[in-house]
Amino acid sequence: MTNFSNLGLSDPLLKVLNELNFESPTKIQQQAIPVLINEGDSDFIGLAQTGTGKTAAFGLPLLESIDPARKETQAVVLAPTRELGQQIGQQLESFSKYMDGVNIVTVYGGASIQVQIKALKKKPQIVIATPGRLLDLLNRKAVDLASVRFVVLDEADEMLNMGFREDLDHILSYTEGEKATWLFSATMAKEIKNIVKKYMNNPNEVKIDSGNVVNTNIDHQYFAVKAKDKPNLLQYIIQLEPDMRGIIFCRTKRDTQSLTEQLQKRGLPVDALHGDLSQAQRDQVMKRFKNHTLEFLLCTDVAARGIDVNDITHVIHYALPDDTEYYTHRSGRTGRAGKTGISLALVSSSDQRKLNFMQKKLNLKFSEYTLPSPVAVENQKLITWAKRVMDVKTDVQAIKDHQSDIYELFNELSKEELIDKLLTIELDKFGIRDQGFDVADLDNVSLDSRSSRESEKSPYKKFFINIGKMDGFNKSDLIEFVMTYSEIKKKSIGEITIEERRSYFEVLKEDLSQMDGAFTDLMLDGREIRVNAANRGGGGGGNGGGKRSDRNDGRSFKRNDRKRSSGRGGGGGGGKGRRSGGGRRR
């Protein structure tokens, strides 16, 4: 097993790495560090995704290569964003703990340039900078790059995406004589190749194949949904997922801002990061995210560069990226520091081919995301609330003047009645049931691009029903339900899939006429039962729909406005005796 002591690092660096609990090098570190230590005077290209340890891959060799005795700027590290620059600076400061005489200065826009000029007067060996601020300092003659021996371009593809090409040309023109250019990037785009051709000479190259660096701590999931339902679905997920904290990726700045405004109007703890924000606004958003005032950031791919937060539980792809490398790049924001994470793609029918391609290209298996149960979430919240009430230390002195009046008001209530009223108040606070959105109406999209062609050949037609495991159903129950409320025989029912909140079943095409109107006006626990062709979405179709009735506390199936006079089990009574309790909960 490779460890840092095998990579040619000096004792001061090995000592601090041990203190920082750097146990074993990542793939990019294993391959890049020895090359940069032994051949650091040559140009170098490192291709690897975010989250793979690129800062240490170039930072450790850079510290080995500078001369602390020389009080002049020997290395410049360029980063696309302030946040990434700060992170690089902090990490290099930590690495240099036992290296006497090393001075590192980080400069970026949005901070006092006078303070930065004062720091540069101390002649740091390493300057870490964003391109715009470094140009400003060069124009003011506050920094001298004439002695620079190393130029590091970190996240080079994003610097170019953000429009820094001319700035890079200008900055590099200030570096004189022999120097090595170390370029690190997630992708090898055309613009990167132009940089390589213009500024680099026979560079050494290390490439970590994106297909092999997908974090194994990440669970890749998808949920099929109509494009128009995505905002409502996202709200539903945010409100119901316990302890969820994440980054939501959108395609454009406009999409990011529009979706943020929609979610904020619904009272959700979200805010946006995009290129139109000032540095002060961006800093404020990141501060709120890090202190958990915000739980979700909505970002474009460019705006998310430089975000380094280790407690992100979910990455949500509101819009899938076009490039598999960007998918890996996004997903790498979660599942860090030994923790597990979820990468969730919200896919419409038009995304099906793209998701299939990513699954094959990245050698991933996307599992279907299960929507959280409102009842389970409410119960968890209520238990937490009840424990908090139990832990309250009664302040007898404070309440004594109020007890008699309040006791008198509650005197006629039993303990159970009082608790029920308090539970109702707490449930109203959660607002979970008032979604204005029926998850049963979501579209179903298969990951298998061949499914639509195969369905044409199949003797069966597939149906969706908004009953699942949460209602106590298994395959036998669903077969009995279909037989009870239609004229379908067991031999006509094909494959059955039971999920948490919904299920699918197949019926022989030759018997489809017996499905017509079979499930109209059927209720379970006050919920309208919907049975529709699986790829048509909910709401409508000849087999679902109908008026809603009042909640049926017996939890049995119930017809609304009419009784069924034919068929097995005779209509509103709930079918066979074993199923009369309908939707029993386990």
Image (tube, rainbow, N blue to C red):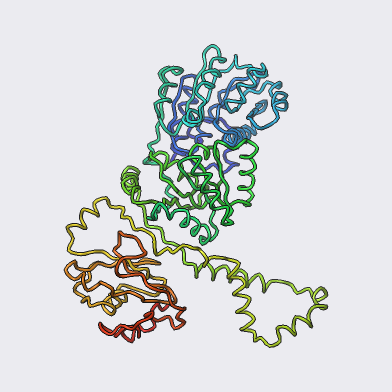
Give how far across and how far down residue 552 sits, in percent. 45, 81
Q: Note whether 246 is above or below 409 in the view shown.
A: above
Which is more toward the observer, 101 or 49? 49
Give how far across and how far down residue 75 sits, in percent. 58, 22
Q: Residue at x 40, y 51 (%)?
A: 227
User: Outermost residue toward the top?
Assistant: 177
Which is more toward the observer, 31 or 223? 223
Side (left or right) of 430 relative to 340: right
Can residue 557 be seen in this snapshot? no
Q: Quadrant of the N terminus?
A: top left
Side (left or right) of 344 relative to 452: right
Give how far across and how far down residue 528 sits, in percent. 40, 72
Numbered disc total: 0
Which is more toward the observer, 146 or 138? 138
Which is more toward the observer, 494 or 231? 231
Can residue 4 be seen in this snapshot? yes
Question: Residue 500 is drawn in which quadrant?
Answer: bottom left
